[in-house]
Amino acid sequence: MPPTTTEEKAQKRLEVKARSTLMMGIPNEHQLKFNSIKDAKLLMKAVEKRFEMLDQTFDRLQKLVSQLKLLGKMISQEDVNYKLLRSLSPEWNTHVVVWRNKTDLDTMSMNDLYNNLKVHEPEVKGMLICTFLYT
């Protein structure tokens, strides 16, 4: 049903504005994936899920490594670090290439690798997150 009251019309305008603002922040190559979502809240949830960042990836891998240790399976530090790098989203590819070529990746702790990557997260998030935060 189309909005009839002034309040409903104002709410509809805010909804359209919120969705439009979110869509402007999505990189062009991802626009088609999100275009069919008409509700701003659902769109935001879909964007957050698609652009999962470093914290969630790190937490997931850390839990897996802990569970494997409990089962008596040890993984080398180098393997853990490579797994962290491989599990990052494509937006991280430039940084992943740099870190895979580091000579101390086999001895660096996963926490140190995470902290080094964390420094670059704002750059990786780029304009997408800036748009969401400042609109």
Image: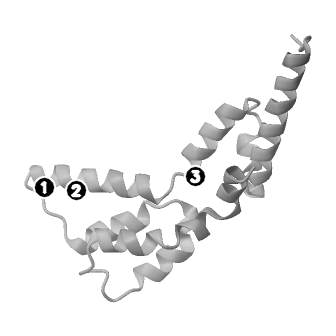
Q: Residue at x 66, y 65 (%)?
A: 126
Query: CA separation, marks 2 and 1?
Result: 6 Å
Query: CA separation, marks 2 and 3?
Result: 23 Å
Q: Which residue is mark 3?
A: 51
Q: Residue at x 78, y 56 (%)?
A: 28
- The residue type indicated by label 2 comes to Val
In terms of depth relative to the viewer, which is nearer, 4 or 55?
4
Up-down relation of residue 25 to residue 120 (above or below): above
SS type, badge 1? helix
- The residue type indicated by label 1 comes to Lys
Q: Which mark is residue 65?
A: 2
Residue 63 position, x and y percent, is 26, 50
Q: Which residue is mark 1?
A: 69
Along the horizontal axis of the image, is 20 left or right of 124?
A: right
Q: Which mark is residue 113?
A: none
Mark 1 touching mark 3, by CB under 8 A?
no
- Quick one: label 2 or label 3, which is nearer the N terminus? 3
Label 3 environment density (alpha carbons within 10 Å; few <14, some 14–19, many ≥20):
some
Label 2 environment density (alpha carbons within 10 Å; few <14, some 14–19, many ≥20):
some
SS type, badge 2? helix
Q: Residue at x 73, y 29 (%)?
A: 39
